[in-house]
Amino acid sequence: MSEPIYQADIEQRLDLLAQQLEEEVEQFAVFAVERAEAEADYKLQYHTAILRSTETTVAAKEAQAFKKSAQEFREYKIAEALEKACQQKLMSIRTQIDATRTISANIRNLT
């Protein structure tokens, strides 16, 4: 049998979730900036390599440019993945807040 849930418990949980949400929003901002910078670095390296390429076909120029910008591309994709993971965590926290609010409303209706 489970323990009864009190309104104070719900309020504590909501406070904790609000704090987590705030921290995660700040982290998301950091990840978004890092992703944007990594994307800009990659595109600059890639397009510079295309312009400097001595290859004659477009496909060869693109292949050479990709090879020269592979590290920047990797860093960009990692930054993008971190940003997306953080975004998913934000959605999870918001879902938990919504569920906790529903529980809170149900408890209020019982009392």
Image (spheres, rainbow, N blue to C red):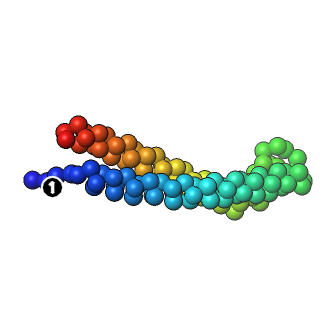
Which residue of the protein is positioned furthest toward the top in this rendering? Answer: 109
Residue at position x 28%, y 55% in the image:
9
Above or below for 109 versus 70? above
Q: Which residue has dot 1 on it?
A: 3
Taking depth in this image into account, of 90 and 19 the one nearest to the observer is: 19
Q: Secondary structure at mark 1?
A: loop
Please give the name of the residue rendered at 39% of the width and 47% of the height, measured from the top-left corner.
97
Give the crowd class for mark 1: few <14, some 14-19, many >=20 residues within 10 Å: few
**Residue 111 percent across, percent down from the top left:** 19, 41
- Residue 103 visible from this viewpoint: yes
Give percent across and percent down for residue 40.
Answer: 75, 54
Q: Position of residue 54 (x, y in %)?
A: 90, 53
Residue 83 higher or lower than 106, as above or below: below
| Residue sitting at the far bottom | 71
Residue located 39% across and 58% down the image:
16
Residue 34 at x, y percent in the picture: 66, 59
Is residue 93 rendered to the left or right of residue 33?
left
